[in-house]
Amino acid sequence: MVVGIGEAYGALKDSFDIAKGIKDISDKVALNNAVIELQGKLLEAQAAILSSADRERELEEKMTGLKRQLSAYEDWDEIAANYVLMDYGGNTYAYEFVVDPSETSNAPHRACPNCFGHRKKSILQFTLRDPYQRDHYKCHACGDTFVFGVSENPPSIPEQY
Ligand SMILES: [Zn+2]
């Protein structure tokens, strides 16, 4: 049941009517009953007001959450503008940070293509270079691993004498 300001107003109006009638009650039992009824109506009004305040607070929280999402959505476009989809050979791709030479704080890096598709920046961490000269990277956000580069034959091991 949705309780709001209308219900609070109704309960307060009933309380007022009861309070107006109390002055004319001379019987002690009837007076006690009227006071109990009055307290009940006041509690009803208080509950309706609190419920209404809870709903208002809930809506404000929802709105704050939506504003935050919108802000993150807008921020992402700005972040994404600093990356280009790079072909590392052998049909291997990742997003590479476009380094601005004037900004020394931004180190060159690759961003996870999975996370990038979900509007999230996650820097790929280099793991190793395999014997086929391919670079292995890991995304710690989604847990995926990536291998970049064209596969080359491993260097031949010199014969032992
Ligand atoms: Zn990822």
Image: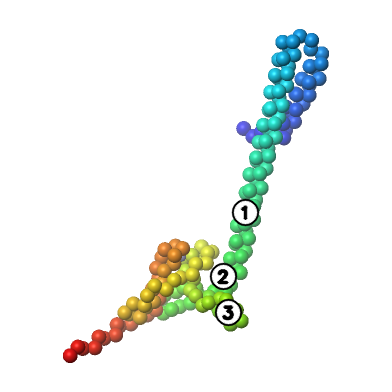
Query: Label 2 neighbourhood size at 10 Å, few (<14), some (14-19), many (20+)?
Result: some
Which residue is more in the foreground, 110 or 36? 36
| Quadrant of the rendering where the N terminus is positioned | top right
Q: What's the mark number on residue 101?
A: none
Which amino acid lies under the numbered mark 2 shown in the image of this protein?
A: Ala
Mark 1 or mark 2, which has the lower sequence index?
A: 1
Q: Secondary structure at mark 2?
A: helix
Question: Residue 31: percent from the left, percent from the top?
Answer: 75, 14
Give the x, y percent position of residue 113: 47, 69
Residue located beneath label 3 in the image: 104
Q: Is residue 129 left or right of residue 13?
A: left
Q: Looking at the picture, which amino acid does disc 1 mark?
A: Leu
Q: Which residue is mark 2?
A: 80
User: In x, y percent, where is residue 45?
Assistant: 71, 29
CB of mark 2 near ligand 1 (< 8 Å): no
The residue beneath circle 1 is 66
Coloration of the structure image: rainbow
Q: Residue at x 64, y 56 (%)?
A: 67
Name the mark nearer the viewer: 2 or 3. 3
Q: Is 152 or 57 nearer to us in this picture?
A: 57
Of helix, strand and loop, which one carries label 1?
helix
Label 1: few (<14), some (14–19) or many (≥20) C-alpha neighbours in 10 Å? few
Q: CA distance from mark 1 to mark 2?
A: 21 Å
| Residue appearing at x 72%, y 26% in the figure | 42
Residue at 70% from the left image edge and 35% from the top image edge: 49
Circle 3: residue type: Thr
Q: Residue furthest top?
A: 27
